[in-house]
Image (cartoon, rainbow, N blue to C red):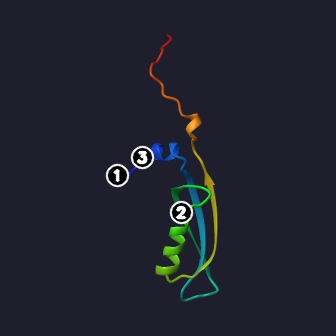
Amino acid sequence: MQMSETEMMLRGYGLTTAEVFYRMPDYKNVLNTFVWQEYDLAPDHPKLFGFIEFWQEKIEGPLHSVRFTHRKMISPGEWRNVVGEFTYH
């Protein structure tokens, strides 16, 4: 069963964005970019490193470099369960 984005954030996942620079297979002097985003766990980043391994095994364009950032959108301490609501005219 797939977790929702909120459940993932409450379990410590954050949004990882990677910019992959790779060489074109036919034109080795040309660099191209690819942007990848996924919810991942820092500091090990298993999904990011799994993607990089997949790229090296299956994609013809050799990697030049990978630049990434990771941001937690919400932490477990920031989540509050609201039971009621008060309205004021």
Looking at the rendering, which quadrant does residue 17 occupy?
bottom right
Point out residue 30 in the picture as x, y percentages from the top left corner.
62, 82
Q: Are marks 3 and 2 in contact (CB under 8 Å)?
A: no
Return the residue nearer the eye: 51 or 18: 51
Q: Nearer the viewer, mark 3 or mark 1?
A: 1
**Residue sitting farthest toward the top:** 89
Task: Give the amino acid at mark 2.
Answer: Pro
Q: Residue 67 is drawn in which quadrant?
A: bottom right
Residue 65: give x, y in percent of width and height. 64, 74
Residue count near mark 1 (Cα–Cα under 10 Å), binned few <14, some 14–19, many ≥20:
few
Q: Earlier in the sequence, mark 2 or mark 1?
A: 1
* Secondary structure category for the residue under label 1: loop
Q: Residue at x 61, y 87 (%)?
A: 28
Q: Which residue is identified by label 2?
A: 46
User: How far across and down, in percent of the image, does residue 80 sit?
Assistant: 52, 30
Q: CA distance from mark 2 to mark 1?
A: 19 Å
Above or below — where is 57 with respect to 77?
A: below
Task: Count the marks.
Answer: 3
| Residue 46 percent location from the top left of the image | 53, 63
- Mark 2 lies on a secondary structure that is helix
Report the residue marked by disc 1: 1
Residue at 57 percent across and 57 percent down: it is 16
> Could you tell me which residue is drawn at 34 percent across and 51 percent down?
1
Question: As drawn, which residue projects farthest toward the left?
Answer: 1
What's under tag 1, amino acid-wise? Answer: Met
The circle drawn on residue 4 is 3
Query: Which amino acid type is marked by label 3?
Result: Ser
Q: Tell which tag, 3 or 2, sits nearer the viewer.
A: 2
Mark 2: few/some/many CA within 10 Å (<14, 14-19, 20+):
few
